[in-house]
Amino acid sequence: MSKLRVFCLIAAASFSGVFCSELLCRSPAFRDAGGRLFRKGRLIAITDGNGVYEKDLDDEDFFTAADLVVMENLRRVARNEPPDAAKVDRELSLLRAQFGDEKAFLRGVRSNILSISSLRDRIEDQVRSLQWLEKQITAETAVTEKECRDFYETHLALLTQPVRFRASHLFLAAPADTPPEIVESKQEVIDAFAVRLSHGETLAQLAAEASEDEATKARGGDLGFFSSARMPPEFFAEIEKLATGRRSKPFRSRLGFHIVEVTEIRPARVLSFDDAREDIFRALSNERRALIAERLADMLSTARYVRSD
């Protein structure tokens, strides 16, 4: 074959290759073959012209193909969002802190075939995405005063505050798996404390001295206000028997031994709108945010091509 013919064939092949590539590169079959050729695995999805391959799933094994489609679409719609430099710096600093020292951090970066520059680019993409999402959600989540009042008027049953007690307790731990000899010993100790209380010592003094509830010991055993929802039922059943200023005999709950003194009782009541407004506003805002986030997820989950197998 003459040199001239070889040259003509190469030229023709090159020209046709340039022309055909414009069509082939848009084809899922061509993308799939290219992925295999360059060891990226099978084509999983195409979104905004970008292919998602099996290797992408291997690199991020906690992501599904659908997750990667959402992430790629989110990166696309947020690409013009100027990233908050302070947030990027903070995220980079948090990553550094996880490695203990700079050398370990740099080794970790290199082991993931990254540079500091490319790592920062990835973090900037994440910050852009989060900023974009927050803007979409915030733009639609403003809850009005009227919506709060309408919710209040139609949900009064949910806004009834149950009877609440304020009490202090002296506590000795003895859960169900406590050895019998220790249970017996603690029973004797709590009975001795009951005798000391009957002789004029105060529960606050004894709780500060010997209670095993570290959360309340420093404040004399004060549990604050609580309703039945916050306490074990057998504990609350003993509380309900007491009037304000009255003290229980020693009793055992699933947690251990108690002596309890009720200091105040607040009867059940319907919360006023002013008392409930903040909670209503927060609940309605969270519900709206969840609906908007679900809609955004649906929007971002679409791809021009997704494998059927």
Image (cartoon, rainbow, N blue to C red):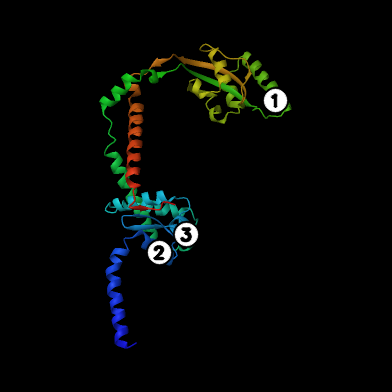
Q: Which mark is residue 33?
A: 2
Q: CA distance from mark 2 to mark 3?
A: 37 Å
Q: Nearer the viewer, residue 147 or 260?
A: 147
> Where 17 sits versus 5, above or below?
above
Looking at the image, which is closer to me, 198 or 8?
Answer: 8
Of the numbered discs 2 and 3, the one sitting upstream in the chain is: 2
Q: Residue at horizontal 66%, vertical 21%?
A: 190
- Placement of 209 over or under 118, stated as above or below: above
What whole-number distance in Å separates the C-alpha atoms at marks 3 and 1? 52 Å
Can you see residue 78?
no
Could you tell whether 184 is left or right of 43 in the image? right
Number of the front mark, 1 or 2:
2
Query: Which picture quadrant has residue 14?
Result: bottom left
Give residue 73's mark: none
Dot 3 and dot 1 residues touching (CB under 8 Å): no
Q: Amino acid at mark 3?
A: Phe
Give the numbered dot on residue 105.
3
